[in-house]
Image (cartoon, rainbow, N blue to C red):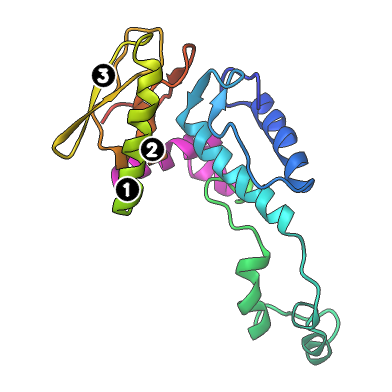
Amino acid sequence: MTTAKEPDQQAAYEKFSSAVTPILAGADMIAGIGLLEDCRTIWLEQLVIDSEMSRIIERMAKGIEVDEETLALDVIHKVGIAKDYLGQRHTLEHFRTEHFLPLVTDRSSFDTWTAKGSRTLIDRAGDEVRRIFKEHRVEPVRGEVDETAARLVKKRLKTVERVHSLAVVKHADVNVRATPLTSRNRSITSLPISSMLDPLTLRSMSYSPEIMWTSKIPET
């Protein structure tokens, strides 16, 4: 949760501090991914940044496993003190799971960073957004899940269609009535129910009276 209006330092420390505490206390879900301005605005670059932040918190919550395998006392005795462990098989087998490997975080030196254009976190997150739009393919859901989703949508519409404007969501050969929950002059994109289950396609839907979709990513 953050009151920041754009992805900035305030968004970073507010989101991290509000997410890490409940996770370390035993919660198993982080809400508000990609949302800014007290959940009134979604920013696609922030969505990517929050995804990375969530992975960092997940690694923290996992902790450090301590047993005979991870302590590797036999390797320590074999290599000795003040020597290199990088060439050991034990290191190769464990370093990918023990270390957090970032997607958009830059860990290069200052000289390398400037040589590559001094690109910011927002720049790198924007690249990842464009890559996802270009390459991501929604995995098909099982038939029974799709049918359940369609049935729940129809059931929900019976309680809201009297007070909201309607749009049509086409699913296969069946027209399913759907309601964009917004007071603004917008309509949702025609999508199959299975596509609506994918977070990336939800960018075309407003789900509260005040929500705004914000991104610097150009239309392609």
Residue at 67%, 27% (x, y): give it: 9
Residue 102 visible in the picture: yes
Disc with the residue nearer the chain's start (2 vs 3): 3
Q: For the point 48% across and 33% down, which residue is it?
A: 45
Amino acid type of disc 2?
Leu
Circle 1 residue: 138
Please state which amino acid type lies under the numbered disc 3: Ala
Q: Amino acid at mark 1?
A: Val
* Image position of 155 (left or right of 19): left
Quarter the N terminus occupies: top right
Looking at the image, which is closer to me, 89 or 27?
A: 27
Quick check: 86 above or below 97?
below
Front residue of 124 and 165: 165
Residue at point 36% right, 48% down? 145
Q: Residues within 10 Å of mark 2 (few under 14, many from 20)?
A: some
Left or right side of 62 for 34 = left
Q: Check contact, mark 2 vs mark 1: CB within 8 A.
A: yes
- Quarter where residue 3 is shown: top right
- The mark lying in front, picked from 3 and 1, is 3
In 3D space, how far apart are the residues under numbered discs 3 and 1 (Cα atoms)? 23 Å
Q: Pointer 3: what residue?
A: 167
What label sits on residue 200 in the rendered view? 2
Magenta segment includes 128: yes
- Is residue 109 positioned above or below 67 on the image? above
Magenta stretch, main secondary structure class: helix
Q: Which one is closest to the eye, mark 2 or mark 3?
A: 3
Q: Position of residue 40 (x, y in %)?
A: 54, 17
Task: From the top left corner, tell me how far across and down residue 195 is, in percent.
Answer: 31, 40
Instruction: Give the magenta range.
Output: 111-139
Dot 2 falls on a residue whose secondary structure is: helix
Q: CA distance from mark 2 to mark 1?
A: 9 Å
